Image (spheres, helix red, strand yellow):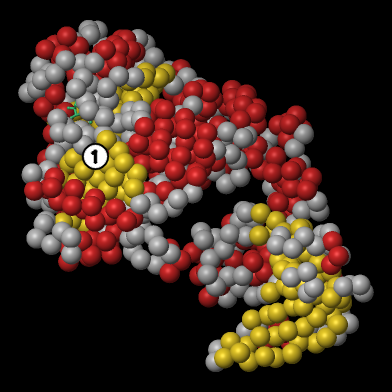
Amino acid sequence: MPLNASVRTLKGVGEKRAALYEKMGIRTVVDLLGHYPRGYEDWSHPVPLSQVTPGEPCCVRGWVASTPTEHRVRKGMTLYKFRVTDGYQTLQVTLFNNPYAAAKIRRDQEILLYGTVVSDGRRAEMTSPQIETAAGARIRPIYPRTEGLTGKMIETNVAQALDLARRVGLPEILPEETVRREGLCDRLTAIESIHFPADGQAVEEARRRLVFEELFVLQLGLLRLKSRSRQQSGAVIAADRTAEYVAGLPFALTGAQRRAIADCVADLQGHRPMSRLVQGDVGSGKTAVAAGVAYSLIRGGWQAAMMAPTEILAEQHAATLQKLLGDRVRVGLLTGSLPAARRRALQQAIAAGEIDLVVGTHALISESVQFARLGLVITDEQHRFGVAQQARLASKGHNPHLLVMSATPIPRTLALILYGDLDVSVLDELPPGRQPVETYAVGGDKRERAYGYVRKHLDQGRQGFIVCPLVEESEEAGDLRSATEVFRQLQEGPFRGYRLGLLHGRMKAAEKEKTMAAFAAGEIQLLVSTTVIEVGVDVPNAVIMVVENADRFGLAQLHQLRGRVGRGQHRSTCILISDNRGEDTRRRLSVMCATNDGFKIADEDLKLRGPGDFFGNRQHGLPQLKVADLLDDMPLLQRAQSSAAALLGADPDLGGHPLLRQAVERLFAQVGEQGLN
Ligand code: ADP
Ligand code: MG
């Protein structure tokens, strides 16, 4: 099909431009059609000069009153000035270093200018406006783009792609019946209007159609993953062995932990496979819950698998679980870096049923891993994994039970719609004796004092973190601190003689693991890092954290970060540094100083930032959506869910809807690829 051809088949797209498109994930003509504008500029109603509001972007129409004159200001800086009139008023226009645009301006020509008018009361002026001929009077798309591609280039190519689509036709992927019942416009119309809308209403209609389609595909995927819950469980256990498990623990479980384990064990004894989410704040002891559930299952004759997002976490979990479960349970650790021979031996043991609990990374999903009797799949920190990956691991058993552990609070209503029959147990209690992390928000002028405080802790044998928003210094970052630079500065200055480590997402996996292991072993005293440490790192000896440019992080994220300290018996401190003195920043950071309760913080985050940001970070572990907003589009989400359920009732494996099936696979495939930042 011609629409699946490379973008290079479009006029004006050569190797260079194709490479730029590729950078944005656009390879084919269809991909380009799916590259929706992030907003629009309204050129459709140019305003007369007399009605312009200075300081706001707008489109004005006028006639060229004087051709551009060239003013060489200094080397490398040439201005082109000309005047535009609408018959009553005059506008002074200035272009910088743009001989190309200036050469096209003809006297008396009617033109449109889009930009911001600045006025000193006598003279109105526009600097570097976009210029179009009078034919450009329409609503124009603003595209997300990458350096080297202009909006105009994208616009032109999209128009060509649309021409092609009109000629060859764009197949409908939604069932005809659904399109009719929901009163949706057809696909081609929607895509035309999202790029080049006739008016605001056309955008709305297009958006409604595309949002519905996206949510429909999402729901089909989720429902298909869930459909297993109607089937028989393969791993029913006879006895609740929790008492035995508890007897071997070095601590007493909290009431919340006991309740969560009881919920799960009751599920294991039932005849449906369990699908349960255990939601608990950082430090609430989710691992001990997972171990307790695994214990009864394993003593009942089944195997369990636990998937962790990184090698270091997998290692940590394997060690912790072995300790919690005692030597009656054989725990194995399977990661990508295992030497081939050991890996083979371990796989054989797993296949022979000689390992009871396998902890691992993505390596667990690999085809060569086979279980003798997999009865339970546990995933930790759900938002780092796709639902699809969990399903793939689950397919290695016969309808095994699923246990998902997450520290991310999702509003209940949304969870119900998204997960439907997923059951939830909440750990609303922290282990006793946990001291809240004392948190302070300070300006950059207190940085030296903060460092002194950190040194004091390091001298006492404790460890700490310095967290930065960036990996490396960059032009546009302004005053944002980068881990690489801060690491260098600290090593040469304030922390000379201390053992420092650097950790960020651009390091190779093996390097990251090595650094984390050295930190866990106490060899590194102070770890300078980006947010890669956000997930699950458990080093109880780490008691102090300094966060640079704290205003750049979301509250939920700060909470996750802060959760890396305060995990042992030592009093812990978190210092949030920010030079942003805005009211909003002050309020957000004061929330962090006032509470350690993740649910309260998530609530505040929602209130302060709105749902868009909160869910923007893929915190929900779902595929990234292009047009839909899960909270704003909740009513459509509900409709999409019931339509999807009806369709699956009639066509469970979507055999009769191959295009939809492809769309589902595509949407969920990307979830499998997301890694740490
Ligand atoms: P999270 O919920 O963040 O995954 P963990 O499972 O890592 O929390 O537990 C955090 C720490 O609390 C661990 O060091 C663990 O041993 C300890 N812990 C868990 N449950 C209890 C308990 N009931 N009493 C005391 N300490 C506990
Ligand atoms: Mg954990």
Residue 217, can we see it?
no
* Residue 458 versus residue 560 in the image, above or below: below
Q: Residue lying farthest right? A: 87
Q: Quadrant of residue 320?
A: top left
| In the displayed structure image, the side of residue 146 where residue 370 appears, left or right | left
| SS at mark 1 in the image | strand
Pointer 1 local density, CA inside 10 Å: few below 14, some 14–19, many at least 20: many
Q: What residue type is disc 1 on?
A: Thr
Residue linked to disc 1: 573
What residue sits 61% from the left and 35% below the top?
A: 632
Is residue 378 visible to the viewer in this orientation of the structure? yes
Q: Residue 509's spot in the image, x, y percent?
A: 25, 54
Q: Residue at x 37, y 48 (%)?
A: 550
Name the spot of residue 513 as percent of width and height, x first: 20, 50
Q: Residue 547, how many percent across, how many down? A: 31, 49
**Which image quadrant is residue 652 in?**
top right
Image coordinates for residue 537, horizontal then vertical, percent: 23, 40
> How many numbered marks have been drawn onto this rendered protein structure?
1
Q: Dividing the picture into quarters, in which one does residue 235 lie?
A: top left
Residue at image position (55%, 73%) is: 148
14 relative to 187 in the view: left or right: left
Tell me the residue at 19%/40% (across/down).
543
In the picture, measured across the screen, residue 489 lies left or right of residue 95, that is left
Q: Is residue 51 left or right of residue 580?
A: right
Depth order, front residue of 649/142 = 142
